[in-house]
Image (tube, rainbow, N blue to C red):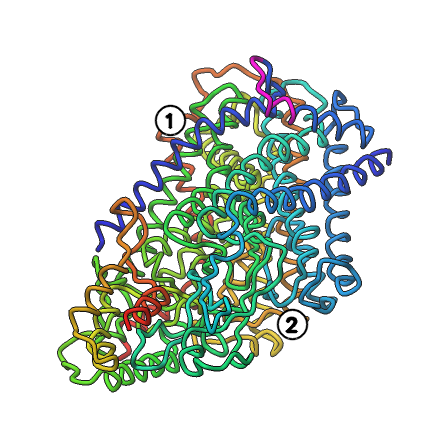
Amino acid sequence: MSAVRPTLVLFFILTVLTGVIYPALVTGAAQLLFKDQAEGSIVFKEVEGQRIAIGSKLIGQNFTSPKYFWARPSATSPAYNAAASSGSNLGPTNKDFIAAVNDRVKAIKAANPGWDNSKKIPVDLVTASGSGLDPDISPEAASLQLARVAHARELPLEAVAKLVSAHTEKRMLGFLGEPRVNVLELNLALDDLR
Amino acid sequence: MISTGVLQLSIYTIVLIALAIPLGNYMAQVYSRNVGAQARDPVTNSLLWCESKIYSLARIDATAEMGWFAYAQCFLIFNAAGMLFVYAIQRLQPLLPGNPENLSGVSPDCAFNTAVSFASNTNWQSYSGETTMSYLTQMLALTSQNFLSAAAGMTVLVALIRAFARQQADSVGNFFVDLVRSIIFILLPLSTVLALTLVSLGVVQTFNGSLEYKPVEALSLNYKSTDSSHLAKLARGPVASQIAIKQLGTNGGGFFGVNSCHPFENSGALSNFLEMLAILLIPAALCQTFGKMVGSQKNGLALLSAMTFIFLLLLSVCYGFENAGNPAFTTLGIDQLSSDINSGGNMEGKEVRFGVANSALWAVATTAASNGSVNSMHDSFTPMAGLVPMLLMQLGEVVFGGVGSGLYGMVVFALITVFIAGLMVGRTPEYLGKKIEAYEIKMASLVILFPPMMVLLGTALAVSVSAGTVAVLNPGAHGFSEILYAFSSASNNNGSAFAGLSVNTPFYNYALGVSMFVGRYMLAIPVLALAGSLAAKKKIEAGNGTMATDNWLFVALLIGVVMIFGGLTFVPSLALGPVVEQLQMTFER
């Protein structure tokens, strides 16, 4: 078995090349060229003279107060736990799943005063995302919450609507991906409004 | 909107084929040792320098030729070393550096499963990455195996291609050279470029450990206090470098538990498009490499056409059912119609930035190739849409398939096809000028019979013991689908899952570990034996009675053989799972 020695030596050389040198090289280049993205696109804010991290613009956060736009349901525990991502993995015919969706529909109707019962709820707002950290909602899911947010903040509806359309990201080049609204960025812009 | 969805799927397919042809030509040069034969640029020069340095360090004679048996020996020793190494690193992780989260050692059954999984290019993950594996383990054991197992798959294919190209030869190439060249000239450069592009789009790449932050709502509630209450944690790591190779090498094992659903692994529409291209790029390009190296590009394109046809057919089924959404939702007053302002379709387990079209496309691409990464949760797909990925794996991962392993699987199906056609007209079957005889068909039969056997026996075992059934998350037919999916995935070296199944148990870790082992090595060895026997044969000129293997008739026959073989084997079990569930969903309300 003269093949054993060269095979093993080759294995260790290639392991070091692809497992140490390659990631180190990529990390070095990434930190040099795209520091902000490589560190997680972190959003900072001045609080009492201190610059603190308040999240990443790519990672969704949980919002429950009526004065914020709400994100999608999250299957992580607790919701939007960015230390342990998870989907629900519930199947389409699972009775618990249908019941949970039904509850979410009711909760949305109750939370948005003056609800018009003929109005339909966009599907993304009552289903859990794959990661449990989805930063986005659909434009329709944002416009559904307009009245509630404007009311809670005592702002004119048009001012909030304008903010939403400014934060709506269309399909890339007109066809790639899906239209969406980044909830964290929208809510931060709301806080800046007043 | 269905038209935007169809447009995205079409553009993807066109870009894929357009990139695959030139890459295929380049890879043919790599394996024929013609890189840099003409004008040399500094990049090629440094890669060539790297290559020769590796040979001299390992004291390898790069000019030596190997017979199939010696080639297979090196392949096996190399893989055994990989398994032992990955196992050891996981077990010793708390004693080693590069563990900023202080994670404990991985359990023996999980470590065994992961070792087989990553060495066999499956990348089934029974664990959740960010809470189980240290940075060192992720890089030194897992990222490296992403390269090594992919390259090992490519060596087996290259040996088989040479067997067709050569005649009366007693050798099929040099395992070391094919391995090193796959890594140095193909996988490493492509991965580096893709990784850095992904970082520019938001995929993280850092050794700085997880980050504590104060969520916006917590901040607004106690605005005045600077205490550390309500702090949340953001998991990060050297992600992009692993994502690039997990996509390119049809590995699929992500950094995070939810794989490419995670915004740090897949940040937006463009990163998603690039990651999806990377899934099928090399497997598709290898068809062109094959054609080029055996001296008939039309034969390579015939295989590529058969793959593309099956791919598009099943893609339309999956997208159609996902876009239709869940019928149970209509009575709840939920809008499932996709448009410019609404995601629409079945959005459970999907991200808004990808929507239904890109999630269905990814699911079909990742299971057509033996990739197994996900950008949505397959367990939450509508039943018939979930059947598609399952079927694609059960067909033997030959529709594009794994890097190397997909095409050698498809070539085996081509041999079966000429054999069946030959039986029908009573002539000795030939493929690319080589007579296909009893020995070749025996080896080919092993290749197509082992994975279905492991899928069906494994599923049967798991549904008969309580250790198998307690793991199920969803009740009824869907629970059966979860188990069937797990064994289809492991036995065909895919690695994706109906992730509701709790598989990090000794029963599943060992059962699926064995399935992955058989699904890789009990196929690769017969293929190398096949290569040895074909290489020794004379090439015969095509005569009047030779069936052409580069025209549409052959493509149609090949598609028929793949679909009928897979169909006959798996229709009964698919009927018990997704088909029953679809009928229940449609009629039982």
Question: Circle 2 sits on which residue?
Answer: B505
Q: Which residues are magenta?
A: B38-46
Image quadrant in which you'd find residue B329 = bottom left
**Side of B400 where B342 appears, left or right:** left
| Residue A127 on image: x %, y % | 35, 72
Looking at the rendering, in which quadrant would you find the C terminus of chain B? bottom left
Q: Point out which mark residue B551 bears.
A: 1
**Side of B64 where B215 appears, left or right:** left
Image quadrant in which you'd find residue B32 = top right
Q: Is residue B479 above or below residue B400?
A: below
Secondary structure state at the residue bearing disc 1: loop
Residue B40 within the segment the image draws in magenta: yes
Q: Point out which mark residue B387 bears.
A: none
**Looking at numbered disc 1 in the image, what kind of residue is underneath it?**
Asn
Residue, x 55% and y 56% (percent of image)?
B254
Residue, x 44% and y 48% (percent of image)?
B201
Q: Is residue B45 above or below residue B302?
A: above
Choose between B192 and B325: the one closer to the eye. B192
**Side of B363 where A117 appears, left or right:** left
Chain-order first, disc 1 or disc 2:
2
Label 1 marks a residue whose chain is B
